[in-house]
Amino acid sequence: MLITCPYCGPRDVIEFTYQGDGNRERPQPASQDLDAWNAYVYDRLNPAGDHNEIWQHSGGCRAHLRVVRNTISHEILSTAFARGGHKTESRS
Amino acid sequence: MSPRRTETGGRIDRLRTIRFTFDGAPYTGHAGDTLASALLANGVTLFGRSFKYHRPRGLLAAGVEEPNALVTVLRGEVREPNIAATMVEIYDGLVAVSQNRTPSLAWDIGALNQLGGKLLSAGFYYKTFMGPVIGPLKGTRFWMFCEHFIRRAAGLGKAGTAPDPSRYERMNAFCDVLVVGSGPAGLMAAKAAADQGVRVILADLEAHFGGSANWSGEIIDGMPAAEWAQRTVAQLGGNDNVRLLPRTTVWGYYDGNTLAALERVTDHKETPAKGEPRQRYWAIRASTVVLATGSFERPLVFPGNDRPGVMLAHAAERYVNEYGVLPGQRVALFTNNDSAYRSAVALKKAGAAIVAIVDVRADVSNDMRRLAGEAEAELLDGHAVVATEGGKALTGLKVQRFDATGGTLSGDERSIHADSLLMSGGWSPTIHLASQAGAKAEWDPARQAFLPPRPTQRWIGAGAFTGSFSTAEAIAEGRAAGVSAAGGTAAPAALPIVEAAPGDPDPAPVFEIKAKGKSFVDFQHDVTAEDVRLAHREGFVSVEHLKRYTTLGMATDQGKNSNVPGLAIMAEALGKPIPEVGTTRFRPPYTAVSIGSLAAERFGDLKPQRLTPMHDWHIANGATMYSAGLWYRPMIYGLPGETVEQAYVREARATRESAGIVDVSTLGKIAVQGPHAAEFLDRVYTNMFSNLAVGKARYGLMLREDGLAFDDGTTWRLGEQEFLMTTTTANAGKVMQHLEYFLDVIWPELKVTVTSVTDEWAGAAIGGPNARAILASCVTGTAVNNATLPFMGIVHGRIAGVPVMICRLSFSGEMAFEVYSGAGYGTRVWEALIEAGKPLGLVTYGLEALGTMRIEKGHVTGAEIDGRTTARDLHLDWMLSKKKPFIGSAMMDREGLIAPDRLELVGLIALDNRPLNGGGHIVEELDEDNPHDSLGHITACCYSPALGKYIALALVKGGKARHGTRAFVSDPLRNRFGPIEIVSNHFYDPDGSRMHG
């Protein structure tokens, strides 16, 4: 599997660390809504198909990326900095 | 000349004789021979014994799919079992032995298993050895009794125990076009792609490129196909943009068009050349792959189809045309399709007598009748073989009239005398890699075969792989695939002209002849047609279950011969068409892969070592080093004759009495900088950092999102917008990633950067009553008195001319200072401190004394912050700010995390004055024979020189409420039982008067 880091270009998956489901919404820091916190901390989507994920280029520039990956074909559909900014589309 | 070697023909070099042994007997062959062809040329018919029944077995195939002729190759002490003799190139001195026979191949006592045929039918193991014991010879206990004998009797070759001295190598390759398979289709694809100027890799598992061109006997462009192939390869070899990989099996097709291949670099050589590895693992990333992997001929399933002398028709053709070996003198053929007729003609030309062609079809075409005539063979159309005769070699066969539509036999049996029976049950495209790449194969009723699916990755198929079995089609498809894969469009010059025997690619849908006797489907695992039907009768309907229950296709050949016939028989039993039964998915590897090649250079101790700047000093000064994660840290600086306990007790005592110094360079250090650095730390730590004054440090605690404790350490405010965070040694990486995650993903609006500076700083902690005096005597540029350097204060100065940063903080509980300098000057500062300390009784101390002093003080480390404890459990709730939210604040008060029966941090004192052990349990009542009702466990323990007692930290239910009570330690693994007293974790100087000074 190759992931295209917006900084570093296409790199092997071994350079990256999976950082979880990218669909999770963190409640406001002061929120006391335990259900919302519970969903954020413990609930994960596990779709068979396109999935929003967070990956860190831990063996490279260390940026966190938002990656859309197809969990069936492992095709990487797009990558973007989690902080926003540059985005790479790669569906062939 | 060997009895079966032809006078001419083939690509072997008859002038070069090669000597080797098989089962201890000397043989000769020629350069270019495989072990299979050389033994066949010597008249050997018996190559191995079958898996379950120990039936004699000969060669079935000539290539990688060979299920019977598996041998063990010996090289010195190293033995490599289960290699197909068809894939072993002979070299002078080759030593090969047969397998699964006792005492010898010809006389095998295991053959007695044939008498008990019913006993070993499908599911034998499940029926006999699983479940409750009913009757004397059943159940799991019976298995435990039988296992030894069964493991000896069943199975294949024995693995060796000697270490493998070979070197393996790992390579990464990148190309525009990877062509797998070098038959006419693959060669054309490689040529067409290379002509477009792109980077091409051509890989073939055989030693010689050319595939079927090497033995088809066809004419391409007016020359023998084998010569055409050689010329094409020579042209390819002259291109800079082409890499040729012979003896290279592409065995895995992974995501992102990454393919794995195994190159057997020197397995065919007597001695490798200098620097050559035995095998090379290739990870190939290809923009496009051309799959030209050809097809496998299928056996027919009929009684006695496994007798030595029964062979696939194309394999015989290959032995004759490629190796100049006749598999027999009187040859019969048995087929359901046209391709066997060409084989008959080839054997006839090479000098064999073709006694009969038995064809299940009644409507044989005129072209085939003409070829039968050319072979001077009697054509028995509408017939089938119902039995074979002979022992370790074929002597004859029996045929009967056969109706292909009903599958029924009729009329009298007729015997035919023959020493070789060649069969062809049609062809199956080699779709393994396409299947691995991720899609389901599709059944083609005309070809009676599974054809490759539509690509889900970037590959293009060509030739027999796609079901196009003629060479002319292969050449056209190969070139088209090569041009397309290279991104070209133009159709170049005319295609090479092929002269080939005619033939219809579609076989009759006949897989099995049902007659009395064992008819083998899977030769390597001894699975018969009756086993498949038995599985059906016992209720196995899914093809995946069938496979596992009968073990069909689960041997080392992974069903290359048997998959389709097995499915066809299952489909018939179910009364369903084959596509409804479906097929199994192929998985990597395509053929066996050596573990050595996967490991390549990566074996032995591969851990990098992290050494502190003072490492060499520690070694030179008698430290015993201890590995902590990747770091190496001094454990003790032992004196001659001292035990570890004596050393750490001495070091800790001296530190508390005068002064001690310890290397703390391994602590994680993260620079947190930016306008929002203080705000960020307020969110990350449970306590406040924004109100920390510049030039002061504070102890901080981090929680995880779920509210459990994560890490602790001090963070120093070096400037308004600049902090130096320290973490525990073990968690440095995790904390860094945690901070980066929140800055990147959760709070991208915060203007903060975090930088790992662990390796930039050398750190020394110096503590004890004399610590300040020692510092004062060697630090310049700053005072270190209480006014200038109060508790948790930071000053900058110089030691031995080196700029240092000094923070007054204490882990040991003494008046203590951490002295940081640039890593390159660490040893210089360290030595200056040691020198300054000499008159004041300074000792160096290691991790053991460090641990002892922290236990005495009741400080927590990773042993207590174990991912299950909360801040309250550790009595750190005073650090939980109520003025602000922080990571974990919302989740830390959940019901289960504030329950009264949680394990809490306490101190323990051994009342029997004996050492305690980490992991020992605490119980209220001692029951040595039946340990139960644990209240908690010991996390850290030591002998405390300050208290003169064996003490420990523990996590115990009830915690503080138990202070002053007695309990017992129960540690049955180490047989340590005894009374303890539960006390506060703050054993020593609980009010901190020593460190505040």
Image (tube, helix red, strand yellow):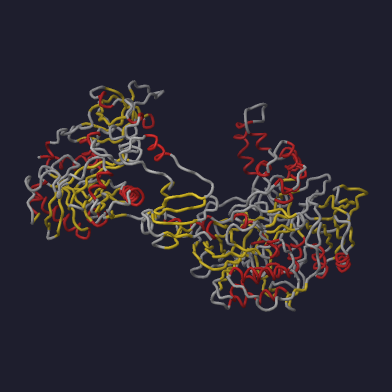
Residue B269: image quadrant is bottom right
Q: Is residue B831 above or below residue B267?
A: above
Image coords of residue B529 (percent x, y)? 76, 45
Q: Position of residue A89 (x, y in %)?
A: 47, 59
Left of B175 or right of it: where is B26?
A: right
Which of the image's four quarters has the C terminus of chain B? top left
Choose between B554 and B135: the one closer to the eye.
B554
Count of numbered circles on the image: 0
Q: Foreground residue, B819 or B684?
A: B684
Residue B528 visible at all = yes
Seen in the picture, residue A41 relative to B595 is either above or below; the reply is above
Taking the spot 30% from the left edge, 48% from the top edge, the residue there is: B626
As drawn, the residue found furthest toward the top would be B925
Picture coordinates of residue B843, whole percent (x, y): 16, 47
Tell whether B563 sits left or right of B906: right
Q: Is residue B456 above or below residue B321?
A: above
B682 vs B21, left or right, is left
* Residue at the image point whose x is 19% and y is 59% from the top: B825
- Above or below, comparing residue B225 to residue B973 in the picture: below
Residue closer to the observer: B533 or B770: B533
| Residue B906 lies in quadrant | top left
Residue B109, visible in the rendered structure = no
Looking at this view, name the residue that lies furthest to the right.
B411
Quadrant in the picture for residue B143: top right
Image quarter where the N terminus of chain B lies is: bottom right
Coordinates of residue B476 in the picture (x, y in percent): 69, 70
